[in-house]
Amino acid sequence: MDKMNLDKKRIITISLAITLLIGLVSLVILVQQQQNIRSKATSLDAYNALDVTDNAEKPLQYKDENGVRTYETKSLDVKVRVRDLQKLIDETQP
């Protein structure tokens, strides 16, 4: 009887371990796919449709990191103006 219970426990333990392993692999794959979709969603046309300037109307310098622009300024007085509305609309449509 003890041997039969021990075999059932082993089978259950192995089944749980395999299920957890499959779940972990699936989770890693899904997380990577979500990141790939997000990186494709940003387009330079949307950025080029905007003018970002300081309070003296001087264009701000930016860094482009992985398709995301980061503007650097010491002032909190920043102006964002839509230069090309059609580009902006085209990029936001699904």
Image: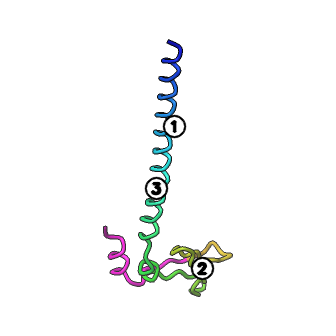
Between 15 and 20, the residue placed more toward the observer is: 15
Q: Residue 29, labelled with which disc?
A: 3
Q: Is residue 46 magenta?
A: no
The percent position of residue 2, horizontal first and vertical second, equals 53, 14
Residue at 46% across / 45% down in the picture? 22
| Relative height, residue 12 to residue 94 (above, below) | above
The percent position of residue 43, horizontal first and vertical second, equals 43, 76
The residue under label 2 is 63
Q: Amino acid at mark 2?
A: Lys
Using residue 88 as the reference point, say whether residue 29 is left or right of it.
right
| Relative height, residue 65 to residue 17 (above, below) | below
- SS at circle 2: strand
Between 15 and 32, the residue placed more toward the observer is: 15
The percent position of residue 38, horizontal first and vertical second, equals 45, 65
Which numbered disc, 2 or 3, marks the residue that appears first in the sequence? 3
Q: Residues within 10 Å of mark 1 (few under 14, many from 20)?
A: few
The quarter of the displayed image where residue 40 is located: bottom left
Q: Residues within 10 Å of mark 3 (few under 14, many from 20)?
A: few
The residue under label 1 is 17
Instruction: Compute the Cα span from label 2 to label 1.
Output: 46 Å
Image quadrant holding the C terminus, namely bottom left
Number of dots carrying numbers = 3
- SS at circle 3: helix
Which numbered disc, 2 or 1, marks the residue that appears first in the sequence? 1
Contact flag, marks 1 and 3 (Cβ < 8 Å) = no
Instruction: Compute the Cα span from label 1 to label 3.
Output: 18 Å
Highlighted magenta segment, given as a residue range: 79-94
Residue at 50% across / 77% down in the picture? 80
